[in-house]
Image (tube, grey):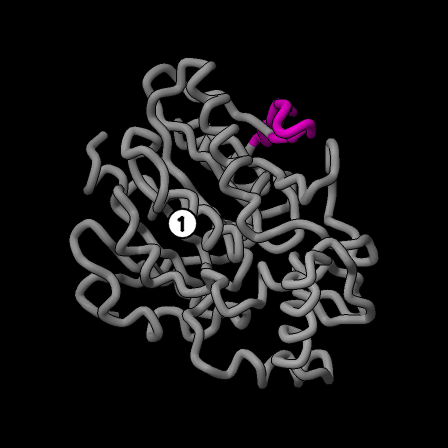
Amino acid sequence: MNGAGRTIRRWRGPLALALCLACTAVRAEPVSLEHDNLTLLGYYEPPPAGAPVVLMLHGTLAHGDMEIMSTLREVFAEEGWGALSVSLSFGDDGRTGMYPWDSVHRHLITDAAGELAAWRAWLTDRGVTRVVLLGHSRGALQMAAFAANAESSAAEALVLLAPPAPPDGREAERYGARFDDELAARVREAEALVAAGRGDEPLANVGFLYCEDARVTAAAFLSYYGPTTANDIRPLLEASPWPVLVIAGSEDEISAGLPAALGTAMRAPRQRLVEIDGADHFFRDLYAYDVVEAVQGFAEDTVGP
């Protein structure tokens, strides 16, 4: 690891697993708010007096009560912090569960910023003054984009958990291998529809995110695959008004190569890269404790207790 990074290794075995299973699960309070004529849903673990709350965002087409979100909420609560994991609406009122791949995808990657701002205001209304932002996978990109334009008082630190590795110029190649289609041709098709004022018109049988043969509007497709899409985490690191912690898993095949790709982009001491030995993209089981330990240690080092 470079000077701005470190690796976490922890003993694991039957006793450690037994201790983890013996922990008392904490049930989060389902919460909601109204935003742009939609009901947004979240899951809230209130903090002890004076403790921070971690505002958490899930990854691609997922939700705020998926395993990694619910586990992190519980562990943060065990360790004395609050947590609020939220579900992006993707334009659906009161959305729960994974977003159906066969729905018409009308959501834009930039829609997250407004919803995150609404949830941050929701915390303020409940007297929460100390907030740490955490995004997982694609949600890390969206959380970082929100942070780049937020007021400096909105949070104390930004945590990017397994964000996508920066672009390497092979995105079109990987798209073609996954969907047997030409990305550039699909982008041109979507651009032509948007230019003609038909951005809400769906493209048919197109590869989109993890979905094959999806129905996705031209505007939505360009939002995720267009030339102006903010898919590079590096400039967002520079734009953050707060200390930034990036956490990677050594066995993560989805964000593979992240530590090496970030390289000198991390600026110590206010930016830190931590690699958790043995963890995959979802930091299951005891690896969630490593995540929480890294987050709380980073906050103490850069912000204070």
- From the top left corner, tell me how far across and down residue 143 is, in percent: 45, 46
Under circle 1, the secondary element is helix
Q: Mark 1 is on which residue type?
A: Ala
Residue at 53% of width from left, 56% of height from top? 138
User: Is 218 in front, or is 178?
Assistant: 218
Reply yes or no: does residue 206 show up in magenta.
no
Reply yes or no: does residue 37 show up in magenta.
yes
Residue at 22% of width from left, 69% of height from top? 264
Can the viewer see residue 124 in this picture? yes
Magenta stretch prevailing secondary structure: strand
Query: Relative to 145, does residue 205 appear above or below in the rendering?
Result: below
Left or right of 262? Residue 184 is right
Query: Relative to 69, does residue 260 appear above or below in the rendering?
Result: below
- From the top left corner, tell me how far across and down residue 214 is, in percent: 79, 65
Q: Which residue is mark 1?
A: 144
User: Is 214 in front, or is 281?
Assistant: 214
Left or right of 210? Residue 6 is left
Residue at 55% of width from left, 67% of height from top? 226
The number of numbered discs placed on residues in the rendered structure image is: 1
User: Is 278 in front, or is 95?
Assistant: 95
User: Is 134 in front, or is 146?
Assistant: 146
Residue 47 quadrant: top left
Rendered-image quadrant of the C terminus: top left
- From the top left corner, tell me how far across and down residue 63 is, in percent: 65, 44
What residue occupies the far front of the structure in this picture? 196
Residue at 57% of width from left, 30% of height from top? 24
- From the top left corner, tell me how far across and down residue 57 is, in percent: 53, 43
Rendered-image quadrant of the N terminus: bottom left
Query: Relative to 54, does residue 220 appear above or below in the rendering?
Result: below
| Stretch in magenta | 24-42
Can the viewer see residue 18 in this picture? no
Circle 1 crowding by C-alpha within 10 Å: few under 14, some 14–19, many from 20: many
